[in-house]
Amino acid sequence: MRAVRVTEWGGPEVLKVHPDVTIPEPQVNQILIKVGASGVNPVEAYKRTGRDAKSMSLPWTPGTDCAGTVHKIGLAVTNFKPGDRVYTFGSVTGTYAEYAISTEDNVYMLPDQLDFKAGAALGVPYFTAYRALIQRARAEAGQTVLVHGASGSVGIATLQFAKAYGMTVLGTAGTPEGMQLVRENGAKFVFNHRQDGYMDEIMTATSGEGVDVIIEMLADVNLQKDLEVLAPDGVVAVIGSRGTAEIKPALMLGKESAIIGVTVRGGVKGQKSRKVISAAINAGIQSGWIKPHIGKEFPLEGAPQAHHEIINGPGALGRIVLTVP
């Protein structure tokens, strides 16, 4: 099979398609999927540089989530059969390939309403969004939610959940196109986070009260500003950070605000959480309000461009996917 393989840590140029990689065999609780499309996530670009080299081995195929068709199942798999359309959250072998293996507990049925490209936008973005907004920040109908960096795939997913669940949504983006996308996906107020004074505009939009929940994609840049615009008892849920942050903890004391981290965990407890999330995603798809937005798509050979775009692009516009014919 064709698969992207990293044989040395480095920049995007180390992502190379190998044409003769052996198709893996699923073990007892695993599923072999013929990939139709694979999602591209920032963490894969970080890992490619060798950031986690001590816990990884080469050669390495990136990719966490994909959508495609079940090709073969392990002996203990009971909920899927060859031919089923599925999407994944997690992969054993990596998804930048024509075939990928996931364990059964990380595979979910893909509703007929979505094609494989949209399916490849469900795993990391929508699981992370629900985990952050509902399970960690415990946001509720009637609250005000700020999604910082809302034009990316996780941001779009968060906007859709928040709007559907009765919250007042504010979003930021860094380009006019991103701001329009944020508006189209449910934000009542939209701000340019590259513009001086935009946090003052957020306070004005909330009549000086601030926001109840902030979903933060770049904590090293925004965390101090987040604390300044939080309402009393507010929560900042940190999804992403590329460095260190300096904050004034005193801002948290009088407001009794909180900063929490977010990850979609594995293990038994994580499985229970993911079942709840997958059910919420399916309900949103059936109701028509979960609509993944595909910003850019590349073939497998375009993986280097995809990695450059997701880290160094001018501004996020939904999900980046690799298509596999």
Image: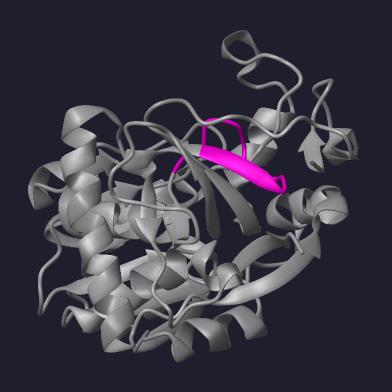
Pick the residue in front: 231 or 323: 323
The answer to whether one can see residue 250 in this image is no
Quadrant of the rendered image containing residue 29: top left
Q: Is residue 80 above or below residue 243?
A: below
Image position of 31 with respect to 267: above or below: below
Q: Main secondary structure of the magenta part?
A: loop
Q: Position of residue 159 (x, y in %)?
A: 36, 75
Q: How is the image coloured?
A: one colour
Residue name at image x 28 percent, y 71 percent:
282
Please state, as top left, top right, bottom left or bottom right, where the C terminus lies in the image. Answer: bottom right
In the displayed structure, does residue 115 sit left or right of residue 287?
Answer: right
Left or right of residue 142, residue 124 in this image = right
Q: Nearer the viewer, residue 38 or 166?
A: 38
Which percent across, then down, holds residue 87? 46, 57
**Residue lying at 24% horizontally and 57% vertically, measured from the top left:** 277
As for residue 18 lying within the magenta part, the answer is no
- Whole-percent x and y of residue 135? 17, 52
Q: Is residue 284 visible?
A: yes
Q: In the image as oriented, which residue stretches furthest toward the top? A: 54
Against 83, residue 245 (above or below) is above
Asked if the magenta segment contains residue 100, the reply would be yes
Q: Position of residue 15 (x, y in %)?
A: 84, 38
Q: Residue at x 64, y 30 (%)?
A: 24
Q: Quadrant of the N terminus?
A: top right
* The image quarter in which residue 249 lies: top left
In this picture, which residue range is highlighted in magenta? 90-101
Counting every numbered tag in the picture gives 0
Q: Does residue 58 appear left or right of residue 184 in this picture? A: right
